[in-house]
Image: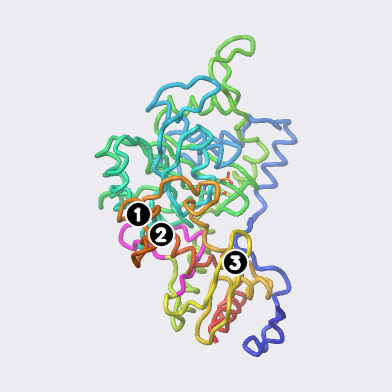
Amino acid sequence: MDYLQDPRFEGIKPFEGRIWLSSPTMHGDEQRYVDEAIRTNWVSTVGANINELERSMAEYIGVRYAVALSSGTAALHLATKLAAERLYGQARPNEGTLTGKKVFCSDVTFDASINPVAYEDGEAVFIDTERDTWNMDPVALEKAFELYPDVKLIVLAHLYGTPGKMDEIRAIAKKHGALIVEDAAESLGAKYLVEGTKWVETGALGDYNCISFNGNKIITGSSGGMFLTDSLEDANKVRKWSTQSREDAPWYQHEEIGYNYRMSNIIAGIIRGQVPYLDEHIAQKKAIYERYKDGFKDLPITMNPFDEAKSVPNYWLSCALINEDAMAPHVRGEQDQLWQHICGKSSPGEMLDVLSFFNAEGRPIWKPMHMQPIYRLNAFVTVEGNGRAQSNAYIKGGVQDTGRDIFQRGICLPSDNKMSQVQQEKVIEIIHRCFD
Ligand SMILES: Cc1ncc(COP(=O)(O)O)c(C=O)c1O
């Protein structure tokens, strides 16, 4: 479609350079630390950059220990495995630690949050999403414990940098004797007011905590992740597992399965150079969120919500949700989609196609895990209970599926912290014209 021929977009020209969803923002110090590592020959998985990065991130997040790993996914894998070993003991080398066990998981998240459950041969049970923060719904979680009282592990993510309802979820976990793996990959720098008394960073709210330094995150090393804990024993175990699980012997001696998951000192140098800019990046992302919020006041859309009293997001991605009565027809298949324009309405399909035409990158809301073909047969629990097989050919009605609804009506907006105010105003104008 050539939107230059569409009178709705008259006078708007494509951006010369692409406006990204969220791209790396380098400052110069990164180069210095990388060069220093190369000059001093610390080109390995040990070195000053790793040590300093672990120290500074532990301090920032307020935990005793941080273990630098090759990715957030690696951190989540080892966090999940550690929780599973504590609950169910060490598995045989050819078996996952979650064999035969169910785990309650966030539903609207990136699949890396919850794939480690499958790596460890466990079965994810997806918990529906609430509307106040777009994270795991505590009411649905409580329902899930009614349906599956034996479950002892919860894996939850803070979507797009917005903390979930941690007081409620931690209380439910405590009541049922369950552990929490916290995926703070997207929410580094976001805070939550625990029980009305203490502000705690995401990444310090679970029993096992993870962050990511992937290229699209709020600070990055191109890749990288971290496991965060107050337990020296857990930190040591993750360090051991991440470096092939070597025992204390003069030769290669192994009593457990190992992984090559440690962070490189080169990558650590990039991230070390980024850490001092974390708060600046958050402030830029917040300004982007607020400009969108203000710019959309007269449109039938709302921004991704958060609890103002109990949380401070890092505003990693700004998102918009189209009001139900302003949704134009938009259907998605497994790999293709079809949308139709109707005057006064729009759809995620239309908005993303138009933004892309004008050279700006948005993205659909992460497709819920319970809708993914790979997890199509896993259980899904909503506030009403079992979320599968709830319609009836002979009776009108269906299941209340909040994750599906947010996926259908929402989009992630261009949220790059290098986007200028003028560029963002043009993005806002393009979205206005989608509704003309
Ligand atoms: C919520 C969430 N969890 C986990 C990950 C995985 O992190 P990584 O890419 O560092 O492996 C990501 C993003 O990449 C993510 O957004």
Q: Could one spot residue 20 in this view of the protein?
A: yes
- Which residue is at a point 32% across and 36% down the rendered structure image? 178
Q: Percent x, y for residue 355?
A: 63, 73
Q: Which residue is mark 3?
A: 362
Q: CA distance from mark 3 to mark 2?
A: 18 Å
**Regarding mark 2 in the picture, which secondary structure is present there?**
loop
Q: Amino acid at mark 2?
A: Trp
Residue indicated by mark 2:
134
Seen as rendered, the residue at the extreme top is 250
Callout 3: helix, strand or loop? loop
Between the C-alphas of marks 2 and 1, the distance is 13 Å
Mark earlier in primary sequence (3, 2): 2
Q: Where is the N terminus found, in terms of image quarters?
A: bottom right
Q: Earlier in the sequence, mark 3 or mark 1?
A: 3
Answer with the quarter of the image where residue 68 lies: top right
Q: How is the image coloured?
A: rainbow
> Could you say which disc has been placed on residue 382 in the image?
1
Distance (Cα) linking label 3 and label 1: 28 Å
In the image, 182 versus 239, the foreground residue is 182
Question: Which amino acid does the dot numbered 1 rest on?
Answer: Thr
Residue 307 located within the stretch drawn in magenta: yes
Q: Which residues are magenta?
A: 305-322
* Front in this rendered view, residue 163 or 435: 435
Furthest-front residue in view? 394
